[in-house]
Amino acid sequence: MKSRCRFWTLAVLAVVMFAACYGGSRLGSAVDEPSVAERVWAYGMRHPEGFTLCLRTMECPTEGIAVAYAATQGCHSREGLDSVVAHAMGHAGFVSGWLDTADSLYYFDSTRLFPEDSIAAAIRFGKENGQIAIFVISTGEEIRLR
């Protein structure tokens, strides 16, 4: 009986954790956005090549297609990162940072993750949101949209 109860407890916990970072659930307002933004900024400074970070766990997913929301375009500084984090907390819960080699600017974006078998949907969302590129996390492939 105990092992069965433990199994269900772990199963529920796994579903909750998956939903928190991959199901598009919104993060609670109890999270201190400026301190999260500080942690994201520090992470970005340690990973100048780029990253996608789940704000709930502060870990990077190993797969998915990262596509930024239009609402947070144009953030290149620590000051703008607060609004990116606030948007991400109210949406999918992911923030990405990446260097666009075409213009040499480092971008911070509130990001939505698509399953890797949903490339058409990811491209459509990226174009609808005026994105320069989308990123396949598992392969490191950047797909330019313009």
Image: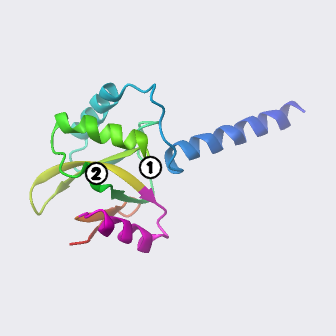
Which sits in the foreground, 59 or 144?
144
Residue 39 placement (x, y as % from top left): 31, 30
Q: Which residue is mark 1?
A: 61
The image quadrant of residue 53 is top left
Crowding at dot 1, Cα within 10 Å, few <14 / some 14-19 / many 20+, comes out as: some
Tell me what residue is drawn at x 48 percent, y 32 percent. 28
Q: Is residue 121 magenta?
A: yes
Q: Amino acid at mark 1?
A: Pro
Side (left or right) of 104 relative to 48 = left
Helix, strand or loop for disc 1: loop
Residue ID at (19%, 46%): 75
The answer to which image quadrant residue 86 occupies is: top left
Question: Bounds of the magenta span?
Answer: 113-131
Residue 48, given in percent of the width and then of the height, sits at 20, 45
Q: Name the residue: 36% across, 51% down.
A: 111
**Label ID, residue 71:** 2
